[in-house]
Amino acid sequence: MKVEARIFDIVTLFAFLVAVVYGLMTHWLSPYGIEPVGLVALILTGGLSLLAGSYFRFVARRIEPRPEDREDAEISDGAGELGFFSPGSYWPIGLAASAATAGVAMAFFEIWLLVTAIVMLLITIGGLVFEYHTGPNHD
């Protein structure tokens, strides 16, 4: 987790540095002064990456070091089962279609379509999450 925390720290520093440069450049070069939308977006980007990096640093202190975090690790230290990955699923297509329907409903402010899209989203999210759930009594 330390590697991920360092990556987010670099993104945080970059975003805040670019925010300062952006604010100064728009102040000097624009006749309207500082452009607030881009400046706020860059500051919020830095804040969000700071939040994610802080979380990774917090977790890294509480778990044992992974092979990626140790300098003396061998490639074989990372071998083993990584988890279960679905070989193929149709649920993401339904999820994308229902999210697109929700986007169209919000764009045209059609409440009935938005309610339908939310129901579709809940069904497709449930299908995606429980796709391989077989129940408590399955052998």
Image (tube, rainbow, N blue to C red):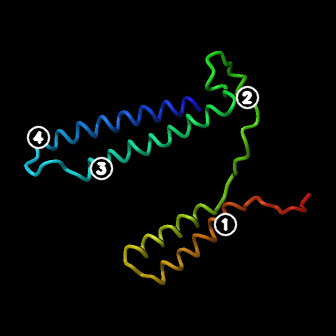
Q: Give the x, y percent position of residue 79.
A: 73, 28
Viewer-side label of 1, 2: 1
Q: Amino acid at mark 4?
A: Trp
Viewer-side label of 3, 2: 3
Pick whichever of labels 1 and 2 is earlier in the sequence.
2
Image quadrant in which the N terminus is located: top right
Pick whichever of labels 4 and 3 is earlier in the sequence.
4
Q: Which mark is residue 126?
A: 1
State the residue position of label 3: 40
Q: Which mark is residue 135?
A: none
Viewer-side label of 1, 3: 3
Q: Amino acid at mark 2?
A: Ala
State the residue position of label 4: 28
C-beta proximity under 8 Å, tags 1 and 2:
no
* Cα gap from disc 4 to disc 3, whole angstroms: 18 Å
Q: Quadrant of residue 88?
A: bottom right
State the residue position of label 2: 79
Please give the name of the residue rendered at 18% of the width and 39% of the height, measured from the top-left corner: 24
